[in-house]
Image (cartoon, grey):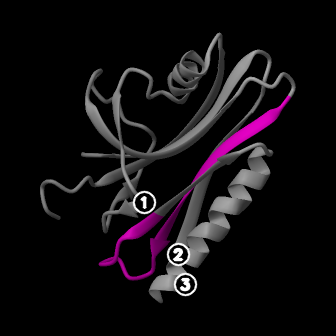
């Protein structure tokens, strides 16, 4: 593998409340374990041959590639969710796909949506799926809430 290619992937999710959308987002990031990192939002390609692992200890302030979805709301009582799925190919020389979704829905609905999106992405490429993994978060808004889910790429 090329040294600049991340070789691990970790799924994270969290939710939180704040007095404003940015603080709700920050609390959701903290809840997901990535709140003290500089997140670099990426598109949805997983390098070939990554290892799926729990989130490693990444030094604070690191620049971290992540594909993510999030939804904030200030509508009291509203249920919001975010989800990501990762589809990995049978052919290990090919890349995988990350799909993100967020909205006013349950975590189950969000997760079902990203799994279907991953399947469609593989169909468009004519590739076979080995496996799909996913993670989601759900939040019922009290004042200002945020639901967040992400796929972190990192290095062993």
The residues colored magenta run: 78-97
- At horizontal 37% and vertical 62% (from top left) the residue drawn is 46
Residue at the bottom extreme, as displayed: 126
Q: Quadrant of residue 93?
A: bottom left
Q: Which residue is mark 1?
A: 44
Checking the image for residue 4, the label placed there is none
Q: Are marks 1 and 2 in contact (CB under 8 Å)?
A: yes
Q: CA distance from mark 1 to mark 2?
A: 10 Å
**Which residue lies under the disc numbered 3?**
123
Query: Disc 2 marks which residue?
Result: 121
- Residue 128: percent from left, percent from top: 50, 85
Q: Answer with left or right where residue 119 lies relative to residue 77.
A: left
State the residue in front, 100 or 6. 100
Q: Name the residue: 25% across, 29% down.
A: 62
Image position of 80 with respect to 4: above or below: above
Q: Is residue 66 above or below residue 143?
A: below
Mark 1 or mark 2, which has the lower sequence index?
1
Is 156 part of what is drawn in magenta?
Answer: no
| Vertical comparison of 82 with 28: above or below | below
Q: Is residue 48 visible?
A: yes
Which quarter of the figure has residue 79? top right
| Main SS of residues in magenta | strand
Distance in Å between CA atoms under marks 1 and 3:
15 Å
Q: Residue at x 31, y 30 (%)?
A: 58
| Marks 3,2: beta carbons within 8 A | yes
Helix, strand or loop for disc 1? loop
Q: Nearer the viewer, residue 148 or 56?
A: 148
């Amino acid at each position: 593998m090329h040294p600049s290619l991340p070789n691990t992937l970790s799924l994270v999710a969290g939710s939180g409340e704040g007095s404003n959308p940015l603080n709700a987002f920050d609390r959701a990031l903290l809840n997901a374990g990535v709140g003290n990192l500089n997140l670099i939002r990426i598109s949805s390609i997983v390098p070939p041959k990554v290892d799926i692992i729990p989130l490693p200890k990444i030094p604070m302030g690191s620049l971290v590639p992540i594909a993510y979805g999030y939804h904030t709301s200030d509508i009291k009582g509203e249920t919001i969710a975010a989800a990501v799925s990762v589809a990995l190919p049978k052919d290990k020389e090919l890349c995988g796909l990350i799909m993100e979704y967020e909205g006013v829905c349950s975590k189950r609905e969000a997760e079902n949506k990203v799994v279907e999106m991953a399947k469609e992405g593989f169909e468009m490429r004519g590739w076979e799926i080995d496996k799909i993994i996913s993670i989601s978060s759900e939040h019922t808004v009290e004042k200002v809430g945020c639901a967040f889910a992400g796929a972190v790429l990192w290095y062993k």
